[in-house]
Amino acid sequence: MERILCWSTGKDSTATAILAKEHGEQIDEIITVLPDPFKMELELINAFESYMGMKVTIIPSPSFEDYFYRVKVRGKHVGTIYGWPFTAYKTCARILKCEPMQNYCKGRNCSFLLGIAKGENRKILEPNESLLIKYGYTEDDAKELCIKHDLLNPLYHHFKRLGCVRCPKQGKAALMKVKELEPEKYQWCIEHDHLSPVKFKPNVTFCEFANENL
């Protein structure tokens, strides 16, 4: 059975990779899906690949723009574009991340190494595994391990939680960091905001939310 590491560029999955290397754990492939990455994340890939001695497979997936302009084919809003993702649902993650990963691995006899830390209330379905749990690492331990090996995603210096550049779940402070780190994508949000049938936040457009920070 193949053993595949699902790498998100975050501390938990990166620490999982480090533990695998340190303990001689089997990894047949490292995969990731990056539909709307920060430039810093793309730069991290080179350092991560160098440390692991393996290439990371970046699974082809729809881009954020593809999701935004995707046309609904069922329901009462058929014919309209998706626009901004709903903050209360996970449709965006399913279309941009989960489905591409599932399609890539379909038909393969494989298990996944997941970045789930000790103490997290998340279920792991067999034959998938967590090396963090196996070796007793909490989320804080995982972060320290990444720092030790100079593989901590630099976005942790700017954000409390990691996600896509244009994720509507982020707060005001995070959005201002997006403006600083990814000015082109921030400007894209301003220019395309009026096209979305869904508001960026409940009852608030992107431009209204952004102007609240001025």
Image (cartoon, helix red, strand yellow):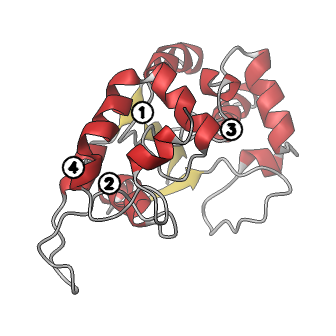
Q: Can you tell which mark lies on residue 37?
A: 1
In the picture, the quarter occupied by the C terminus is top right
Q: Is residue 160 left or right of residue 193?
A: right
Circle 3 or circle 1, nearest the eye: 1
Closer mark to the observer between disc 2 and disc 1: 1
Tag 4 or tag 3, which sits nearer the N-term?
A: 3
Residue drawn where x is 36% and y is 35% of the image: 58
* Residue drawn at x 33%, y 60% as measured from the top left: 95
Residue 49 has which mark? none
Q: Is residue 49 visible?
A: yes
Q: Amino acid at mark 1?
A: Pro
Dot 1 crowding, Cα within 10 Å, few <14, some 14–19, many 20+:
some
Q: Nearer the viewer, residue 164 or 128?
A: 164
Q: Of callouts 4 and 2, which one flags the residue occurring earlier in the amino acid sequence?
A: 4
- Foreground: disc 2 or disc 3: 2
Label 2 sits on residue: 100
Mark 2 vs mark 3, CA separation in Å: 22 Å
User: Are the residues tagged 1 and 4 within 8 Å (C-beta)?
Assistant: no
Name which of mark 2 and mark 3 comes first in the sequence.
Answer: 3
Farthest left residue in view: 79
Determine which residue is flagged by label 3: 16
